[in-house]
Amino acid sequence: MSFASPLFLWFFMPFVLAAVLIAPRSWRNGIIAVASLVFYASAAGADTWLLLTTMVVNFLAGPWLEPDQWDRNRPFRRQLLFGVIAFDLTVLVIWKYAGFATEQLAALARMFGGDFPVTHLLLPIGISFYTFHHISYVVDVYRGERLAARNPVSFVTYIAMFPQLIAGPIVRYREIADQLPQQRSHRLDDIAAGFPRFALGMCKKAIIADTLAPFVTACFNTPDDEMTFAIAWMGAIAYTLQLYFDFSGYSDMAIGLGRMLGFRLPENFARPYSSVTITEFWRRWHMSLSRWFRDYVYIPLGGNRHGAAKTYRNLCIVFVLTGFWHGANWTFLVWGMFHGALLIIERGFHLEDAPVRRGARIARRALTMLLVMIGWIYFRADDLPSALNMVGHMFLPDFNGLTDITLSALTNQRLVVMLLALAILFLPAQPVTGPLLESSRSTPATVLRVSVMTAGLAYAAILIASGTFSPFLYNQF
């Protein structure tokens, strides 16, 4: 079940919101927990048992991880913490990376005339996200930042909450623990604030991302010997826009849904394409993932506290993990290493936080955008040779245009949408539309809210009803 499907929009979501609104306040978490498991089971099927098993293990471990007044049981707690994290990561590695690992071993075996069986497991939807939620829970409890959940319903609500279960935002336990027991009294206000945010996300997804998707597919599916300068650039630009509007649209819908249910989920995007450095880009793109790796990997490794060499090592580790977290493919590893190398270069030349003169800002922003687009080609391509071929054609001008297939995929409607979507590249860094739309009571925000809820939402609903929606891109991670 997708947020952008008729079943969700016209049946599941209204039913859950009505139940939360009408039922006693103390029933909220129970309603959300049951609805979330139903939502997940509708997509994951038999793999739901994996989510339930990991929830049971982490929930039972929680109280034993809490430090007491004198922390006399610290050695036991540390061992238990490592054991639970190892369990969570083992589940993730087996189901997400077994196929990739056995493929590499099989290729190595063939080099020496041998054979090795390849194992392919069906990737459970959302496993990367709920694994990170579990790790956040046990680490925050171990550190004493929050008490462990004693109520299993509250714990299921945190881990399986359907707005963020499939593709984030990645909610750290300490960000939501204090909201779980609170029974908010202003439920109509929450719905009024959250629905425009949800509508904005649906417009991004249905009107822009899904419209561009066929053209992106046509460009990236172009055979290597037919790739041209025009296809490489048009494909890179179109995918840069599609990915942003698809993923930020999902995040807006998730944050809006969470607000309608009485929760304030963390922001995930803040105009990332307005960045003037790659460092700033990662402070604005998929912010919940950046914060997770910062708090649970980068800082525990030492962060930037022990000299330049160890800082660069820590950045390399983080971005290798970031790349592989997105998928079991060498293309994701190269994408992560590419961004890690750029961050190291910026830090080495002290560019990450250096003030940028107004005259140089446009050039720095254009350079950052170019580097991000090059990275997205590796992120989207099926394999490394295809990515290298496409990047090579971006810097080798020729006199060939679009092929017949790509030209037929670029309809007038898609061209207009692409040109309008390009405005995002020229908008200032502030204000960010999503939070402004949700919280501000100013006249411009009210006009924007009403506009989105009328024209934009109505058109998006028509597109979804016609069956043009597609799965969110981050569902595959």
Image (tube, rainbow, N blue to C red):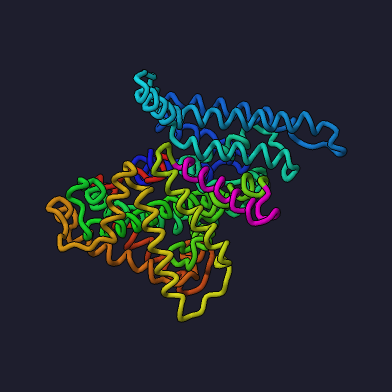
Q: Is residue 104 above or below residue 167?
A: above
Residue drawn at x 18%, y 48% as measured from the top left: 225
Where does the image place residue 369, in percent across and percent down from the top left?
Answer: 40, 64
**Residue 226 relative to residue 116: left or right:** left
Residue drawn at x 44%, y 59% as measured from the top left: 196
Q: Is residue 348 magenta?
A: no
The one of 377 and 188 positioned closer to us in this rendering? 377
**Residue that sits furthest to the left in the current view:** 404
**Residue 231 relative to residue 382: left or right:** left
Q: Is residue 409 above or below residue 54?
A: below
Magenta stretch?
302-326
Where does the image place residue 352, in percent across and percent down from the top left?
Answer: 56, 65
Figure quadrant of residue 65: top right
**Residue that sits furthest to the bottom in the current view:** 359
Q: Looking at the figure, which quarter contains the C terminus?
A: top left
Where does the image place residue 188, in percent across and percent down from the top left?
Answer: 53, 54
Residue 297 visible, this angle: yes
Figure quadrant of residue 424: bottom left
Q: Is residue 324 magenta?
A: yes
Residue 183 visible, this angle: no
**Residue that sits furthest to the front in the current view:** 112
